[in-house]
Image (tube, grey):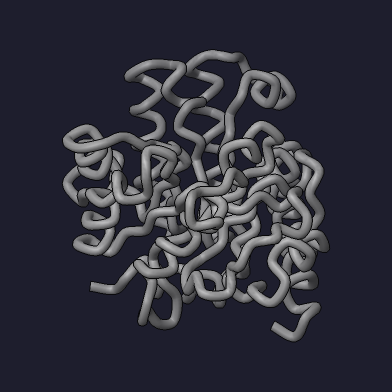
């Protein structure tokens, strides 16, 4: 079975280093002239999938914006997951799940088990109950060729109080997470299946990302204030592993499909320029 890391490496080479988030929040639905209800959600997602599904390496739906409509919203999510995968796009479901024991195992079954209606290529996960608490997700990913992106250094100001706190060995919480994910990827080629989430707006991290061996998801670009050029500051010599992520910067161009594709092409060009600036 081909690993997620291998599929991601190939997708980024073929389609470019870009992840586009599908975040159908109320203000964006209104901006598109759509109603903030199930019909608006369905129409929004269909336009976005049709415009971008065969164009970008990774699409990242944010689960919360579907969950707020209950079971019918989740049915829309299941539908776009199937459509995106059918278009050859890798689906990274932004759920940021984290728990222990049988509960985190159930999350693994929900998202990383091929028989699940919400089966995706990869998920985001929260490690702040301990990285090892996510072991069922890691195990499911290995078994089924999936991926897990673990929060490490997020761009929200409140995150620093936890992520940069130091343990008894002198390492920050974030560096401990980085080091443990690095161990999971040891020996993986061309790219490990276990990634980190590192905000594009945090500047110089003061952390060692050199040995991660897996993808580095960089949200916060575009409307959240990050620029593609900032990636060089945040990631230094690790640019080859960076997966830049945009949402509103692209989706704000809708609902015209041609405008969505043009916005995608524009930010992808910016990312290519930034990620090759250091000879990557």
Residue 117 is situated, as x and y percent measured from the top left of the image, at 25, 39
Q: Residue at x 46, y 64 (%)?
A: 179
Q: Quadrant of residue 275?
A: bottom right
Residue 257 is situated, as x and y percent measured from the top left of the image, at 67, 44
Closer to us: 162 or 111:
162
Q: Quadrant of the N terminus?
A: bottom left
Closer to us: 177 or 12:
177
Image mark count: 0
Instruction: Decide if residue 44 is on the left or right side of residue 111.
Output: right
Farthest bottom residue in view: 279
Instruction: Decide if residue 159 is on the left or right side of residue 130.
Output: right
Q: Quadrant of the C terminus?
A: bottom right
Closer to us: 185 or 37:
185
Is 57 drawn above or below residue 31 in the view shown? Answer: below
Q: Residue at x 75, y 85 (%)?
A: 279
Closer to us: 278 or 92:
278
Q: Quadrant of residue 85?
A: bottom left
Visible in this render: residue 172? Answer: yes
Instruction: Decide if residue 198 is on the left or right side of residue 126.
Output: right
Residue 55 is situated, as x and y percent measured from the top left of the image, at 58, 60
Q: Residue at x 28, y 64 (%)?
A: 145
Q: Residue at x 62, y 44 (%)?
A: 154
Visible in this render: residue 266? Answer: no
Q: Quadrant of residue 103?
A: top left
Farthest front residue in view: 168
């Amino acid at each position: 079975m081909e690993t997620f890391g291998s599929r991601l490496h190939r997708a980024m080479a073929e389609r470019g280093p870009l992840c586009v988030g599908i975040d159908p929040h109320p203000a964006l639905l209104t901006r598109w002239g759509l109603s903030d209800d199930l019909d608006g959600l369905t129409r929004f997602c269909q336009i976005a999938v049709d415009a971008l599904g065969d164009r970008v390496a990774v699409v990242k739906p944010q689960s919360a914006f579907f969950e707020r409509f209950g079971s019918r919203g989740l049915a829309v999510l299941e539908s776009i997951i199937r459509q995106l995968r059918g278009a050859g796009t890798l689906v990274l479901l932004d759920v940021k799940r984290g728990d222990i024991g049988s509960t985190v195992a159930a999350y693994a079954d929900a998202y990383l088990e091929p028989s699940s209606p919400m089966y995706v290529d990869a998920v985001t996960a929260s490690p702040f109950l301990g990285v090892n608490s996510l072991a069922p997700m890691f195990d499911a990913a290995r078994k089924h060729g999936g991926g897990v992106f673990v929060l490490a250094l997020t761009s929200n100001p409140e995150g620093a109080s936890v992520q940069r706190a130091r343990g008894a060995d002198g390492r920050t919480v974030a560096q401990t997470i980085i080091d443990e994910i690095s161990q999971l990827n040891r020996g993986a080629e061309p790219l490990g299946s276990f990634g980190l989430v590192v905000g594009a707006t945090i500047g110089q991290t003061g952390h060692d990302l050199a040995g991660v061996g897996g993808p580095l998801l960089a949200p916060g670009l575009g409307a959240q204030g990050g620029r593609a050029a900032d990636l060089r500051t945040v990631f230094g010599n690790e640019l080859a592993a960076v997966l830049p992520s945009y949402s509103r910067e692209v989706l704000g161009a809708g609902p015209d499909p041609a405008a969505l594709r043009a916005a995608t092409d524009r930010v992808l060009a910016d990312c290519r320029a930034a990620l090759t600036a250091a000879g990557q």
